[in-house]
């Protein structure tokens, strides 16, 4: 069985036909029916059936690193990368031949590479970088066991390039996320300002509405105020005449005038009665004069001493 082709060949591998026993590696020269069936099926492209044969062979030969390498190849072709890596690691056991271990590390690097490629397609750049670094490490181990192998060197170069690519993509993604977060914060601040402004506007509208919502109530209040004012004016008008009678009249020169009784001498009682009689009628006045004459005639003579 030949080694896996480099990743440049569309990240795939192919197996050369097993034509002669002498062409097989040392670890495959021990005849085993399960291994032989697995090799034939894997050569025909039936990775699933080959895996079943290799699994049965692993039970019969649990200490055989070569069987683990075969199982890893079948799992790799089936797409089960995690289990393929486990089988390749098992094939690197210390008791394995250097060439077999070199093949195991080379294919382990291929499994890591493919997994990293899948993660990169999902924009999981950090995880992809880790897989590519594992691929580089496995390639270096293979080259130590088989220095100068062109296929392993080429796979190692590809994995190194992909690490740099994913680092750049991760950097761009971090910058993009940073800018998006900054924009979100700005939008959040703007929304908060708008909400605050809307709240103030609603509050002002509510106040205006409260002032305008009941015009009839304002009219009624105005009428009530007018009625109270009118009532106060009426009460004040009733009190003003009394106050004017009690307050002395002032002269035109600013000095207070004397009461009317002080300005006009009081008439005698007889004169007042005469005036009252005149006010009644002339007949009453004549009677009054007659009574006055009679009163004088009856008055006792004045003493002349």
Image (cartoon, rainbow, N blue to C red):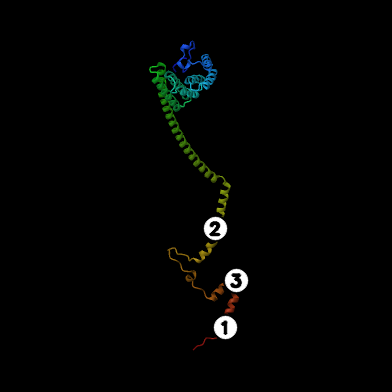
Identify the residue under disc 3.
280
Residue projecting furthest to the top: 19
| Mark 3 to mark 2 CA distance (whole Å) | 44 Å
Picture mark count = 3
Q: Which mark identifies residue 297?
A: 1
Identify the residue under disc 2.
232
Give the mark toward the camera: 3 or 2. Answer: 2
| Mark 3 to mark 1 CA distance (whole Å) | 26 Å
Residue 3 in the image: state x and y as whole percent.
45, 16
Say above or below: 281 vs 12: below
For residue 188, say whether it is visible.
yes
First reached walking from the N terminus: tag 3 or tag 2: 2
First reached walking from the N terminus: tag 3 or tag 1: 3
* SS category of the residue bearing label 1: helix
Residue 155 in the image: state x and y as whole percent.
42, 19
| Mark 1 to mark 2 CA distance (whole Å) | 64 Å
């Amino acid at each position: 069985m030949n080694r896996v082709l480099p990743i440049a060949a569309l990240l795939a591998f192919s197996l050369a036909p097993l034509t002669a026993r002498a062409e097989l590696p040392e670890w495959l020269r021990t005849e085993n029916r399960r291994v032989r069936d697995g090799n034939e099926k894997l050569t025909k492209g039936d990775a699933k059936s080959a895996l079943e044969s290799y699994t049965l062979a692993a039970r019969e030969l649990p200490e055989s690193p070569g069987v683990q390498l075969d199982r890893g190849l079948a799992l790799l072709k089936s797409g089960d990368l995690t289990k393929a890596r486990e089988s390749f690691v098992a094939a690197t056991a210390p008791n394995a031949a250097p060439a077999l271990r070199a093949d195991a590390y080379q294919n382990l690097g291929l499994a890591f590479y493919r997994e990293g490629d899948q993660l990169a397609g999902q924009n999981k750049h950090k995880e992809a970088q880790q897989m590519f670094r594992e691929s580089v490490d496995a390639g270096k181990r293979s080259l130590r066991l088989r220095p100068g192998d062109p296929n392993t060197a080429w796979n190692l170069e590809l994995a190194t390039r992909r690490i740099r690519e994913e680092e750049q993509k991760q950097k761009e993604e971090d910058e993009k996320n940073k800018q998006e977060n900054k924009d979100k914060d700005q939008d959040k601040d703007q929304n908060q300002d708008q909400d605050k402004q809307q709240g103030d506007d609603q509050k002002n509208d509510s106040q205006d509405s409260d002032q305008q919502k009941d015009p009839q109530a304002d009219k009624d209040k105005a009428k009530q105020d007018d009625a109270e004012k009118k009532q106060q004016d009426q009460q004040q008008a009733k009190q003003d005449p009394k106050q004017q009678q009690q307050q002395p009249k002032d002269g035109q020169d600013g000095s207070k005038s004397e009461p009317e009784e002080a300005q006009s001498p009081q008439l005698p009682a007889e004169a007042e009665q005469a005036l009252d009689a005149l006010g009644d009628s002339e007949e009453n006045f004549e009677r009054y004069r007659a009574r006055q004459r009679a009163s004088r005639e009856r008055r006792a003579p004045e003493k002349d001493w």
